[in-house]
Amino acid sequence: IGTVVYQNSTEASKSVAKEIADLIKVKQAQKQPCILGLATGSSPKGLYAELVRLHKEEGLSFNNVISFNLDEYYPMEPDSINSYVRFMKEQLFNHVDILPENYHIPDGTLTKEAISDFCNQYEARIEALGGIDLQILGIGGNGHIGFNESGSLQNSKTRLVALDHITRVAASNDFSGLNNTPRTAITLGVKKIMEAKRVILMAWGEGKSNIIRTSVEGTITNLVPASFLQEHNNATFVLDKAAASKLT
Ligand code: F6R
């Protein structure tokens, strides 16, 4: 696992955006699609803002980008204020030239019975494209990646999961209270994340410093799913000074 520490999250986000832009351009030159795994939450907002800037001011095209988001709450309507569909449109998709048929987000409107087929298809689509070229991750205070909570196995598949209490508490402000906060979500499994050719996990702020240390320096354990990334051959934790402050 590599760690790279920046003065602040803005600088860090710009450098991640540059790596993504360079990859998109390499793939364009090769006439290949660029397969991105994308995250939501507060951590990647600066990254998406910089990608939008690169599109608007520097002509970066997303016409060869095919993306797969990590997760979506379940149940969730796509036009709901807290949906990850809405988040991605507002932060990125509506402001760049990605084709609507080329972005994928787990479907929060499925019937329970339809979820497992959907999850299998989601993985099959990724596989048919040759896997994820670059996966963006945030990290939960409990070490979750995607919504693979504590206890998720390293070979876990894309599936419906129960959200941890701590995850629901973290989200409860957005949902105006714990009672309105979803109890379940659909998440890409750890296996597909680990199969990505390149993984970049972004974390900012003092509040993430303990879990960053545990994930990078602690034993590899399914109690802390981010610790699995120690076994990935091309994973980097991109951190600001505060998030890195407990690393030895
Ligand atoms: C979001 C996701 C989650 C978040 C994590 C950190 O798609 O998969 O794992 O990355 O909960 O969230 P923030 O960035 O809001 O601290």
Image (cartoon, grey):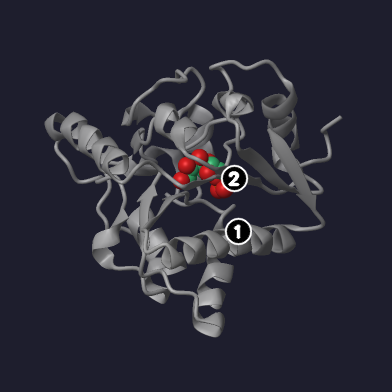
- Residue 126 in the image, given as x and y percentages of width and height: 31, 42
For label 2, the residue is 200
Residue 12 position within the rendered picture, expressed as x and y whole percent measured from the top left: 70, 57
Left or right: 39 with respect to 72? Answer: right
Q: Amino acid at mark 2?
A: Ile
In the depicted structure, whether residue 222 falls above or below residue 146: above
Which quadrant holds the C terminus? top right
Q: Quadrant of residue 10?
A: bottom right
Residue lying furthest front in this view? 30
Q: Residue at x 31, y 50 (%)?
A: 105
Q: Which circle marks residue 127 in the picture?
A: none
Q: Which mark is residue 19?
A: 1
Q: Secondary structure at mark 2?
A: strand
Residue 69 visible: yes
Residue at (26% x, 40% y) in the render: 122
Q: Position of residue 219 (x, y in %)?
A: 68, 15
The answer to whether the residues at label 1 and label 2 have Cβ atoms under 8 Å apart is yes
What residue lies at 31% left-to-right and 46% top-to-bottom? 129
Asked whether mark 2 lies closer than 8 Å to ligand 1, one says no
Q: Residues within 10 Å of mark 1 (few under 14, many from 20)?
A: few
Q: Amino acid at mark 1?
A: Glu
The span from disc 1 to disc 2 (Cα, nearest Å) is 10 Å
Which sits earlier in the primary sequence, circle 1 or circle 2? 1
Residue 11 placement (x, y as % from top left): 73, 63
Please state which of residues 55 and 80 is positioned toward the viewer in this rendering. 55
Circle 2 packing at 10 Å, graded few (<14), some (14-19), many (20+), is some
Q: Residue at x 12, y 30 (%)?
A: 113
Q: Nearer the viewer, residue 7 or 41?
A: 7
